[in-house]
Image (tube, helix red, strand yellow):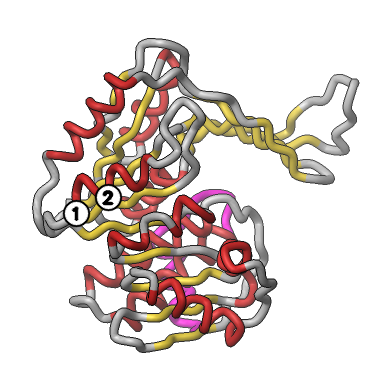
Amino acid sequence: MIYTVTFNPSLDYIVRVENFRAGQINRTYYENILPGGKGINVSIVLKNLGHDSTALGFMAGFTGREISARLKEFGVASDFIEVKEGMSRINLKMKSDEETEINGQGPNITDADIEALYARLDSLKAGDLLVISGSVPNTLPGDMYERIMSRLEGRGIDIVVDAEKDLLVNVLKYHPFLIKPNNHELGAIYGVELKKQDEVIPYAKKLQEEGARNVLISMAGEGAVFISENGEVLKSAAPKGKVVNSVGAGDSMVAGFLTGYMEHDGDCEKAFKMGLCTGSASAFSPDLATRPEVEALLKTI
């Protein structure tokens, strides 16, 4: 079974406005409301590709209930901890001449809520797969990733981590199955600027030296690089297409990689291509990638 963790899920209110002007009344010509958060995106894309998962995390109030309801509409099961104080956040994503985002705060998560999440995670079994991704809200300990991975260490659970800087670096000692920084995040870890595929390879290998098993580097229009735990290096240019919305593309790449890995008995090359095309399919669409969109792109690379 696959589980995803989103510590601070949201309702994403997506609007389009022509020639937005601050201080004036602006009217939308497009709007949509979607459940948001990196782990949630992974769960939705996995379902779009034909694989079930359970979304874990924290929810609160009427917005939290709406997140669960909308996930159900996508066919995604959730088992959130219901927090008593506050409400799950609403994130405004406005697209006009420029893209503007206003993100909410989220609920007040208590020690008892954290313990309840631990209890959910304690039920995972050997052979399960856990995806932990995204930022940690200020109502949680900054070392939540480490606490979870330490708790699950040695239980035969493969863990995927998609996070930035210290959140990622500090868990490498627990040997995550897969990590997926982009080239900018990888460069920020080592204080360098990485623009080309060959430039990221030595730094991705450093992450392996520190404990990561498999490293997948997304590079937007430059494609992606993958280094397997047996040292195999794979590189590919990105499929061609017009970028419509980059939100969720990295999460889609994770879902696509896992799908390819599961469907092809651990074939890393096929998993890599599936991940690349799934990330691109989401970028080329206003919504998250679907199976037909991914398969159409697979034929082009």
Location of residue 117 in the rendering, given as x and y in whole percent from the top left corner: 25, 31
Q: What stretch is highlighted in magenta?
A: 284-301
Q: In this view, does 73 lie to the left or right of 124?
A: right
In which quadrant of the rendered view does residue 114 lie? top left
Q: Residue at coordinates 85% horizontally, 34% vertically from top-left?
A: 20
Q: What element carries label 2?
A: helix
The answer to which of 217 and 74 lies nearer the viewer is: 217
Q: Is residue 294 magenta?
A: yes
Q: Does the magenta stretch include residue 171?
A: no
Q: Distance between the residues labelled 2 and 1?
A: 6 Å
Location of residue 137 in the rendering, given as x and y in whole percent from the top left corner: 49, 32
The answer to which of 8 and 114 lies nearer the viewer is: 114
Location of residue 195 in the rendering, given as x and y in whole percent from the top left corner: 68, 76
Q: How crowded is mark 1: few (under 14 residues within 10 Å), some or many (20 or more)?
A: some
Task: Kindly indicate whether the residue at mark 1 contacts the one at mark 2 (C-beta within 8 angstroms).
Answer: yes
In which quadrant of the rendered view does residue 158 lie? bottom left
Q: Residue at coordinates 38% horizontally, 76% vertically from top-left?
A: 209
Q: Where does label 2 land, which residue? A: 149
Q: In this view, does 17 lie to the left or right of 44?
A: right
Location of residue 222 in the rendering, given as x and y in whole percent from the top left corner: 63, 77
Up/down of 2 relative to 114, above or below: below
Q: Residue at coordinates 52% horizontally, 77% vertically from top-left?
A: 203
Q: Where does label 1 land, which residue? A: 153
Up/down of 284 relative to 53, above or below: below
Q: Is mark 1 on a helix, strand or loop?
A: loop
Q: What residue type is labelled 1?
A: Glu
Up/down of 85 relative to 92, above or below: above
In which quadrant of the rendered view does residue 194 lie? bottom right
Q: In this view, does 64 lie to the left or right of 239?
A: left
